[in-house]
Amino acid sequence: MKTITTHEAKTHLSRYLAEIEAGGEFIIARGNKPIARLCSLGPARRRPKVGEMLDRPMHVPDEALAPLTSEELKGWGI
């Protein structure tokens, strides 16, 4: 793991990010004191497109939409 200064990190951030995407890691130091680790968050998650389904469709059984019987309605006080 390579150690870089804060100045190097600011100056060459794009280059370091490309190396991180390739699997690299860096320690950022202020002077001789390490203060942060620059590493990948893992593979980027793909955002779904508008209207794209992420899961399988939800199934609603027919009996869930059937009207209530008079006995069931009495239980609700209707």
Image: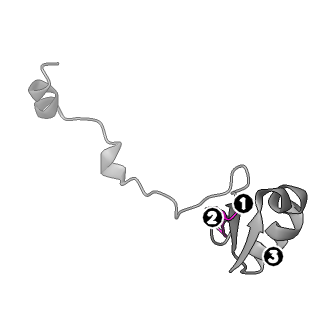
Q: Tally the marks.
A: 3
Q: Nearer the viewer, mark 3 or mark 2?
A: 2
Location of the C terminus (image quadrant)? top left
Q: Earlier in the sequence, mark 1 or mark 3?
A: 3
The circle drawn on residue 34 is: 2
Drawn side of residue 17 relative to residue 30, left or right = right
Q: Which residues are magenta?
A: 31-40
Q: Position of residue 9 (x, y in %)?
A: 81, 60
Which residue is the site of mark 3?
Answer: 19
Identified by mark 2, the residue type is Pro
Residue at the spot of label 1: 31
Q: Nearer the viewer, residue 55 or 6?
A: 6
Percent position (x, y) of residue 35? Answer: 62, 59
Given residues 71 and 23, the one toward you in this image is 23
Q: Main secondary structure of the magenta part?
A: strand
Q: Nearer the viewer, residue 45 or 39?
A: 39
Task: Sort mark 2 into few (<14), some (14-19) or many (20+) by Cα contacts within 10 Å.
Answer: some
Q: Secondary structure at mark 1?
A: loop
Q: Which mark identifies residue 72?
A: none
Relative image position of residue 27 (x, y in whole percent): 67, 69
For the residue labelled by badge 2, is the local secondary structure a helix, a strand or a loop?
Answer: strand
Residue 71: which quarter of the image? top left
Q: Residue at x 68, y 65 (%)?
A: 32
Q: Residues within 10 Å of mark 3 (few under 14, many from 20)?
A: some
Residue type for callout 3: Glu
The residue located at (77%, 57%) in the rendering is 6
Q: Answer yes or no: is residue 68 visible.
A: yes
Residue 28 in the figure: left or right of residue 59: right
